Amino acid sequence: MAILSRIKFVEDLFIRMAWVIENVVNAETEFPRASYAKTIIWVVVEGKRTIEVNGFLHEVQAGDIVVIPPQTPRTVLSSDPNSVPFHFYTIGCDIKIGSLNFAELYKLPLLTRVADTSAFKELSSLTAKLLVQSLQVIKELNALNQPQLVIARVNTDETAALLAVNASFHVWFARFLDMMRCYLPDEPQEIDPRIRRLCTYMQMNLDRKLTLPDLAQYSYISESHLRLLFRKTLGVSPSEYLRQLRLQRAKDLLVNTSYSLKEIAELSGFETLNHFSRVFSAYESLPANQYRKRYYGSVQG
């Protein structure tokens, strides 16, 4: 008898692929500063580039794996025009334990130079197959080359095909994690149960006004202790974490829906459209409407 439902991890684990893209770009092509609501994973097949992540420069080359957590700004710098094109796969995905990001809990390194070349080739091959399978589903949905099309309903056959793609991504991620195992800690970051529960509560109630007294009352601890415990556990204050969650939802809605900016502000829990616009511009260095124009249907990762 194998009763997995008794393992809380199984209940809390959430894995979903948002996109898979094959990129082949010239050496002089520069990607502007961007941050996404998803975890971004690169599988670098050929070439080399310099990327800037959170103000630090990293040299990326063939055989590397890059993992960029949600809300993490990155810029891809131009390179020597005589260099070979930069060829890499991008997978955008949601991978969470409860409401907490898997990449941060398990301390997935930003840049990994994979020593096992056969394992890397296997992962590259799996990624290519995942792309082919995903494109087939998109084709069947008559959405090929229509990146801005939002499909609200699918039939039973299309449902089965989409579930098959998600199952393939689960296989991909399991192989990815197995390949990365030697670079990871023995156990994920320990999160205080009260903070874990509060993070889930915040995630589920972003459209509501959540104040520090409200959060403290929900957690049955004082405001001062909550601030201390939150910063000790996650490195930021409760208000900053909540702001990041709101921005993450807003970016998701900007690039995946046709909601107006006012509707997005409300659904993300910002007090007014003006407040949303100020916060978004301050954190992303461009207005929300410009973010939508840049990334709606044209994600580079």
Image (tube, helix red, strand yellow):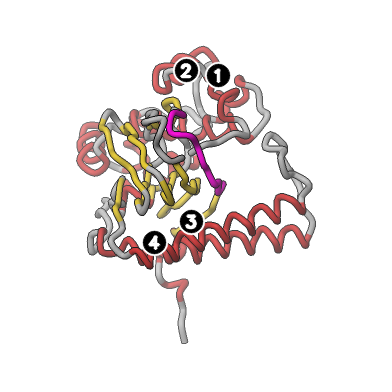
Q: CA distance from mark 3 to mark 1?
A: 30 Å
Q: Which mark is residue 290?
A: 1
Q: Which-is-in-front pick, marks 4 and 2?
A: 4
Badge 3 is on which residue? 14
Proximity of marks 3 and 1: CB atoms separated by less than 8 Å? no
| Mark 4 vs 2, N-terminal side | 4
**Disc 4 or 3, which lies upstream in sequence?**
3
Residue 286 badge = 2
Residue 202: mark in rendering: none
Q: Which comes sooner in the sequence, label 3 or label 1?
A: 3
Q: Along the polypeptide, which appears first: circle 1 or circle 4?
A: 4
Report the Cα–Cα distance between label 4 and label 2: 36 Å
Q: Mark 2 and mark 3 in contact (Cβ < 8 Å)?
A: no
**Distance between the Cα atoms at labels 1 and 2?**
6 Å
Q: Mark 4 belongs to which amino acid? A: Phe
Mark 1: secondary structure: helix
Nearest to viewer (mark 3 / mark 1): 1
The kind of residue tagged 2 is Leu
Q: Which mark is residue 120?
A: 4
Residue range in magenta is 19-29
Where does residue 202 sit, x and y in percent of width and height? Answer: 43, 39
What is the CA distance from the residue labelled 3 to the residue labelled 2? 31 Å
Q: Point out residue 2 in the picture as x, y percentages from the top left corner.
A: 46, 82
Q: Amino acid at mark 3?
A: Phe
